[in-house]
Image: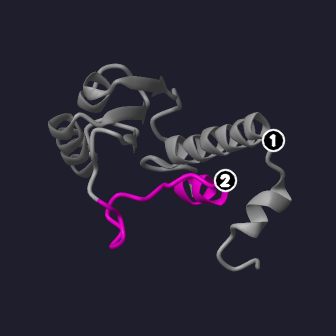
């Protein structure tokens, strides 16, 4: 969702693993989301980013994890670990969604963008 909104604001953004995603370079910033900070796929991406000197921005649930320690910029999003109504990482994932959507709103304001501007760049709302 966040990568899509960035594209709709006119940024070049990709989701790692997409077939059209270009190689990560030192000019790039990569945002990693991992509640545990130990997700194997995210750790692999962090290692690649380190190798090519890309900036790593992490959103994790604590400071005590590998992804947090490997990052250049960090956001700690504290949530309850689990509950009967939201098992596994659901609370972290939902909270991340709200956080990133809030960032979209702030970026829109900073850039003077309106929803209509984003809609013009939306793939299916021409």
* Residue 55 higher or lower than 62, as above or below: below
Residue that extends furthest to the front in the rendered view of this protein: 27
Q: Check if residue 14 falls in the magenta segment.
A: yes
Looking at this view, is 78 or 121 the one in front? Answer: 121
Is 117 positioned to the left or the right of 50 in the image?
right
> Is 35 in front, or is 20?
20
Q: Quadrant of residue 15?
A: bottom left
Secondary element type, mark 2: loop
At 42% from the left edge and 48% from the top edge, which residue is drawn?
88
Residue extending farthest to the top is 63
Q: Position of residue 41 (x, y in %)?
A: 24, 52
Q: Say which quarter of the image contains residue 7.
A: bottom right
Residue name at image x 20 percent, y 34 percent: 50
Main secondary structure type of the part rendered in magenta: loop
Which range is magenta?
2-22
Q: Which residue is mark 2?
A: 9
Q: Position of residue 93 (x, y in %)?
A: 52, 47
Q: Is residue 59 magenta?
A: no
Residue occupying the point 30% across, 20% down = 64
The residue under label 1 is 112
Residue in view at x 33 percent, y 73 percent: 19
Near-viewer residue (5 or 28): 28
């Amino acid at each position: 969702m966040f990568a899509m909104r960035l594209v709709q604001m006119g940024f070049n953004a990709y989701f790692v693993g997409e077939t059209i995603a270009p190689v990560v370079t030192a000019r790039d910033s990569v945002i990693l989301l991992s509640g545990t900070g130990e997700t194997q796929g995210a750790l692999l991406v962090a290692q690649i980013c380190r190798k090519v000197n890309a900036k790593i921005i992490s959103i994790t649930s604590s400071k005590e994890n590998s992804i947090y320690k490997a990052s250049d910029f960090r956001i700690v999003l504290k949530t309850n670990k689990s509950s009967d109504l939201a098992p596994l990482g659901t609370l972290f994932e939902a909270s991340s969604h709200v956080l990133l959507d809030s960032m979209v709103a702030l970026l829109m304001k900073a850039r003077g963008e309106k929803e209509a501007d984003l809609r013009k760049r939306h793939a299916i709302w021409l």
